[in-house]
Amino acid sequence: MRELVAGREWFHSWSRGHHAGIDDTPAKLNWLDFPESLKGKSVLDVGSYDGYFAFGSERRGAARVVASDKRCWEPVGLAYWRGFDVAHWALGSKVEKRLISVEYISPASVGKFDVVLFLGVPHHTQDPMRYLRHMFRVCSETLIIETHTDGNDYDEPMMVFYLDDGLLPEGRPERRSVQFLGSERSPHAPPSKAAVPNAAEAPAVCRRGRR
C-alpha cells in the first residue's frame, strides 16, 4: 500500500498515515462547516478528484455516495483517477464512481441526492452560474459550494474573468484578467477561460444559479 501511495503525486491530503497532498484538505472540513453526520443521506461529490470528501461522507454514515469527475480523471499528470482507485481499495469503500462532466449532470443522468458537494469546481468555468444550475437540479436538501474569489479589494459586487488558463495550482489568478461590475457578463467581455466572483458577488451568483 505504501508503494501505491508513494507512486503518485496527490492533490488531496489525507489523515491516514503521513501522506500530504498539494491541498490542505482536512482544514476545509472546519471552514466548510461540513456535517458531522450524514447518516442515511445520499451524497453526490462533483469534482471528486482523489475522493477525500466522498470517502469522508461515507465515514459519516451516508447511505449512498456517488463520486463524479471528468476533467481530473483524465489520464494526464495529477489529473488521473488512479488516486481515487487506490484510496477506494485501501478504505474498502463502497462509494460509486461516475466519469461524467458537470455539463451532463442532471436528474436523468445521475438522479437526485440529499446532499451535493461542489467543492473547488465553479472557478474552472467561464459560466459558474450554469454549473450551479446543474447542481441545484440534482440537489433535494443541501448544496455545499467552495470556490475561489478574486477582486476582493473592491466593495462593489463584481466578476473577474481570466483570459488565460484560469488558476495556477496555488489558487492565484493568471497574469491576465479583466474585471466587470455586477452579476451579468458584459457583452464587451473578451472570451475567457474561467470566471470567479469577489466576496460581495458570491451570494448573488448562488442565487442566480437557482433560476
Image (cartoon, rainbow, N blue to C red):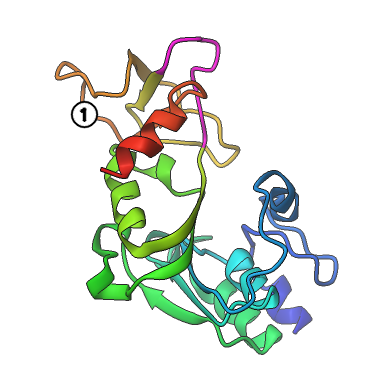
Q: Is residue 90 left or right of residue 156?
A: right
Camera sees residue 165: no
Q: Is residue 107 left or right of residue 86?
A: left
Residue 184 location, x and y as percent? 25, 23
Query: Label 1 belongs to which residue?
Result: 191
Residue 74 location, x and y as percent? 39, 66
Camera sees residue 182: yes
Residue 171 location, x and y as percent? 56, 36
Q: Check disc 1: other Cα within 10 Å, few if <14, some if 14-19, many if 20+.
A: few
Q: Where is the N terminus found, in terms of image quarters?
A: bottom right
154 within the magenta span: yes
- Looking at the rendered structure, the number of numbered marks drawn on it comes to 1
Range of residues picked out in magenta:
148-157
Q: Residue at x 34, y 64 (%)?
A: 138
Q: Residue at x 39, y 76 (%)?
A: 98
153 within the magenta span: yes
Q: Residue at x 65, y 47 (%)?
A: 32
Q: Is residue 38 left or right of residue 97?
A: right
Residue 9 location, x and y as percent? 64, 62
Residue farthest along the left direction in this orientation: 187
Q: Is residue 80 left or right of residue 112?
A: right
In depth, the one of 102 and 164 nearer the eye is 102
Q: Quadrant of residue 88?
A: bottom right
Q: Secondary structure at mark 1?
A: loop
In depth, the one of 17 and 3 nearer the eye is 17
Q: Residue at x 58, y 70 (%)?
A: 54
Residue 13, above or below 198 = below
Q: Where is the C terminus found, in terms of image quarters?
A: top left
Q: Quadrant of residue 123?
A: top left
Q: Amino acid at mark 1?
A: Pro
Residue 55, above or below 102 = below
Prevalent SS, magenta region = loop
